[in-house]
Image (cartoon, coloured by chain):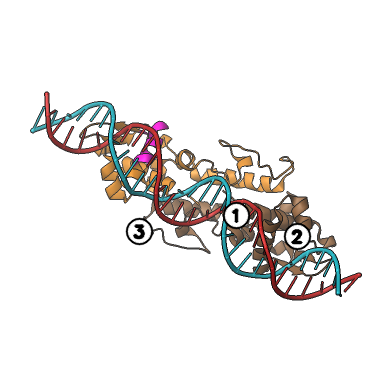
Chain colours: A brown, B orange, C cyan, D red
Amino acid sequence: MLSKRAKYAIKTILFLYENKDKTPISAKSISEQENIPYKFLENILRDLRTHQVVKSMRGPVGGYSLAKDPNEITVTQLMRIIDGPVALIPCVSEKFYESCFECTDEETCRIRKLFNQLRSEMIGVLNKSIVELSKL
Amino acid sequence: MLSKRAKYAIKTILFLYENKDKTPISAKSISEQENIPYKFLENILRDLRTHQVVKSMRGPVGGYSLAKDPNEITVTQLMRIIDGPVALIPCVSEKFYESCFECTDEETCRIRKLFNQLRSEMIGVLNKSIVELSKL
DNA sequence: CATTACCCTATAAAAGTTATAGGGTTATTA
DNA sequence: TAATAACCCTATAACTTTTATAGGGTAATG
């Protein structure tokens, strides 16, 4: 399951994109309009900032705006930043690989083959940019 | 992420299928050969039995065997029995639908559209039978 | 220089995952 | 017919992750 954190992150980025003429937008404002607990949102925004998806301005009239071309921001990226691996088992993850100690041989593991194929298909769907997502 | 429970379930069913000439097979034997904690396995087997994927025989020389044609047992089924929904958000789940109260309108929600498409693709990959999985 | 809004660390409440404990019941087979 | 092997069932413990909340610090605008 997608975590609420990740869902909030996607909603936040979509919101910033669709209101990019009004930026920067305060966390408080995002929180109210998207129904995201304020302090929880701040925490998420910090992650997004660390990963340079979002940039911030301090002081009154400060707030957040996208740090890069929205065509370059994908759902996959956001999921990886917030939730970690897209893959359903760690031994087929591209960015967060870990051997799963249950299986003795990765080369012949059928479960691994199936979930590797699954990961490919998932990324095919999720590699949509925020611009594309906005048009759905 | 796939839970260990689900992974154990898949391994168990695959094991029963590939040793179907020797059935019934005791939980103890499965536990040892597949490296699954015995009591945990019993618990998983109970779920599988309840859902008629597996049947059991008591007494000495008792154990477990597949309750139906292995061509009819799919990975999707096992995942649903053990982990619940395949979908990554509840509002697009076929078997475990729940409205996600964050979004106001399901019809227009773009996140929903994307994850609905994702679920379709996932099921396309995961609807493999144990027989097919065995051949991978 | 007061206000607004971002910034940061710590921690708590709740839920989910991964088992473990301890015993009860059934059916085979010696 | 009794010992034994194996399934059956409930409860709960240990651990991790998720979902926040608290409380204050820091920068920049008007």
Vertical placement of residue A85 versus B23, above or below: below
User: For the residue labelled by badge 1, is the local secondary structure a helix, a strand or a loop?
Assistant: helix
Vertical placement of residue B127 versus A121, above or below: above
Query: Is label 1 in contact with label 2 (beta carbons under 8 Å)?
Result: no
The percent position of residue B80, horizontal first and vertical second, equals 49, 39
Towards the viewer: C24 or D4:
C24
Depth-wise, is mark 1 or mark 2 nearer the camera?
A: 2
Towards the viewer: A128 or C27:
C27
Q: Which residue is mark 1?
A: A124
Vertical placement of residue A82 versus B122, above or below: below
Could you tell me which chain the residue with mark 3 belongs to?
Answer: A
Q: How far is mark 2 from mark 3, CA to CA?
A: 48 Å
Q: Quadrant of residue B24?
A: top left
Disc number for residue A27:
2
Residue B52 showing in the rendered view: no
Q: Which residue is mark 3?
A: A105
Question: The magenta stretch spans which residues?
Answer: B42-54
The percent position of residue B122, horizontal first and vertical second, equals 55, 46
Q: Earlier in the sequence, mark 1 or mark 2?
A: 2
The percent position of residue D11, horizontal first and vertical second, equals 40, 38
